[in-house]
Image (cartoon, rainbow, N blue to C red):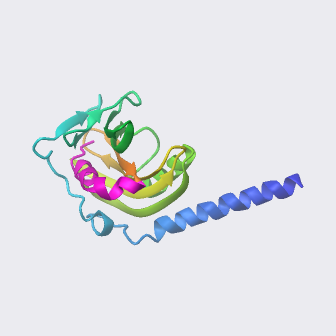
Amino acid sequence: MKRMRVTAGLVAVAVGTAVLIAAIAGNGSSTHGRASGSFAWLHPAAAPDGWTVARTPGGSTFAYPPGWRPIKTDPGTASVALLRRGRIEAYLNATPRQGGETLSDWSHFRPRHNLGEGDMGLRVEAATENVPLGSGRGSCVIDSYTTSKAQYREIACLASGPRSSAVVVAAAPVDLWSRQVAALRRAVSTFTP
């Protein structure tokens, strides 16, 4: 009986991994060299007038809209959020590259990272690779997942520049995504590693 449970568990993991890989490979938005499809909006941009620039201790930057405020997260990161009645309605974070992630494997690395943090129901909606981002090149995914608190959609990009590599994450609860996506995209476009 124990061997059957282990086998069934391994089969479930294998099927889940195959579905995840198929979703990443079949999303129709993967590009090399320039942003298009689901990422046609992604072009390096300066901070819009009136926006504030957040900076990590390592020098990565992104701009964020008026009304958002810095929040405390992990050391070495920069994080801001739009908070209403104690609820995070949108979130931006820049983090130095911390592991073995690369531009060529980002569309696989990020979903595995999220699953490893306990996120559930992860679905990759789009991915792009090796496009202009900030002062360097970037690879990005758009995915959705469920945490213990809410269901989120995010844009997560790994960017490599002349000085360093860093990750930017722009997220919002799925029910607020359409209201926040324009600001999140604009913020990601201002990201410099």
Residue 141 at x, y = what percent?
A: 39, 57
* The N terminus sits in image quarter: bottom right
Q: Report which quarter residue 69 is drawn in.
A: top left
Left or right of 130? Residue 47 is: left
Q: Name the residue at the left extreme.
A: 49
Residue at the spot 73% in from the left edge and 57% down from the top edge? 10
Q: Is residue 180 magenta?
A: yes
The residues colored magenta run 174-193
Question: Which of 125 and 7 lies nearest the eye of the viewer?
Answer: 125
Residue at the spot 24% in from the left edge and 51% down from the top edge? 183
Residue at the spot 25% in from the left edge and 38% down from the top edge? 68
Left or right of 50? Residue 63 is: right
Residue 164 at x, y = what percent?
A: 30, 39
Total numbered badges shown on the rendered structure: 0
Res. 104 in view: no
Q: Is residue 173 magenta?
A: no
Question: Which of 60 and 187 lies nearest the eye of the viewer?
Answer: 187
Left or right of 36? Residue 19 is: right
Res. 18 in view: yes
Q: Name the residue at the front extreme.
A: 85
Residue 161 at x, y = what percent?
A: 26, 45
Residue 117 at x, y = what percent?
A: 54, 43
Question: Which of 38 and 101 lies nearest the eye of the viewer?
Answer: 38
Most common secondary structure along the magenta stretch: helix
Residue at the spot 29% in from the left edge and 52% down from the top edge? 180
* The C terminus sits in image quarter: top left
Left or right of 107? Residue 89 is: left
